[in-house]
Amino acid sequence: MDVSDDVRAFLGDLTSWDLDVLELSVMTNGRPLYVLAFQIAMRYELLSEISCSQQTFANFITAIESGYLKNPYHNSSHAADVLNGCHHFVQALSFNEVLTTRQTFSLLISAAIHDFEHPGVSNNFLVKTKHELAVRYNDDSVCERMHVARAFAVMQKEGTNCNILHGVHHDDYLTMRRNIIETVMVTDLSKHLDYTAQIRSMAANDKNEDIMNNPNYLMQIAIKSSDLGHCAKIKPIHLKW
């Protein structure tokens, strides 16, 4: 995808934690997720690892970005912000020394889809109002299960050429799908305290090496930190969010 010199300069080396994604949205006419995802995929040649064409990837990311609603927070700019944060962890904090290319790709796709079609209300609201999503997903991580299910439905819809995982072996597909599901599931804030308690317990028991050498933990830490990450950005960007 061609982007303007201004956008290229704004993105820099793609590793800045403090990338102003809201400004990127303005610069790209509301397509921050598409532009950022495509630039990351091209720079690190991620698509060749899974035998995915540029057109298929572009189709998928376009469909995902289009599915984000005009929510004040859970919108495509937020998805792009989480994508940027996860990529920052992989490159700037050397998570790529532990993650394989396919795990990295799974993490970045998880970030892109993690709030896909978010209705703008909480899981608790959906459960208490007996919303059809709560009924469908049995009151458990309702939004998160919906995000993943609908994103995979987009991927597999016939005639759309959106199946970014079509070129991987069946066993690899199952592994990548599991990675994506588990990574998105950890963004359920109702389970945040339990999860962080688990990580603190491991750290307190001198299991830091276990955490830092476990791809699943690294992917989960990256997406959780990025999902809540605007609080740790420079003040002007934080105040925008």
Image: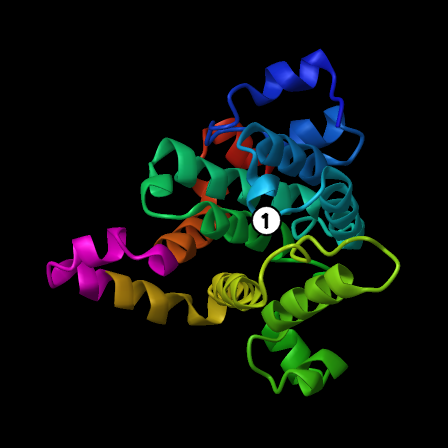
Q: Position of residue 196 (x, y in %)?
A: 32, 63
Instruction: Return the residue found at the far left.
Output: 206
Q: Residue at x 41, y 40 (%)?
A: 90
Q: Nearer the viewer, residue 217 or 59?
A: 59
Q: Is residue 108 visible?
A: yes
Q: Position of residue 135 (x, y in %)?
A: 69, 87
Q: Is residue 234 magenta?
A: no
Query: How many marks on residues?
Result: 1
Its colouring scheme is rainbow
Q: On the rendered structure, is 131 left or right of 89? A: right
Q: Position of residue 3 (x, y in %)?
A: 74, 21
Crowd class of label 1 (few under 14; some 14 to 19; many from 20; radius 10 Å): some
Return the residue at label 1. 50
Most common SS among magenta residues: helix
Eyeballing the image, is 141 above or below 99? below
Eyeballing the image, is 171 above or below 140? above
Instruction: Return the residue found at the far right.
Output: 159
Q: On the rendered structure, is 194 left or right of 20? A: left
Q: Residue at x 56, y 65 (%)?
A: 177
Residue bounds of the magenta highlight: 200-217
Dividing the picture into quadrants, the one containing residue 158 is bottom right
Name the amino acid type tagged 1.
Ile
Image quadrant containing the N terminus = top right
Image quadrant containing the C terminus = top right
Q: Position of residue 74 (x, y in %)?
A: 66, 53
Eyeballing the image, is 190 above or below 65? below
Q: Secondary structure at mark 1?
A: loop
Q: Residue at x 13, y 60 (%)?
A: 204
Q: On the rendered structure, is 85 left or right of 137? A: left
Q: Residue at x 60, y 57 (%)?
A: 168
Q: Is residue 121 visible?
A: no
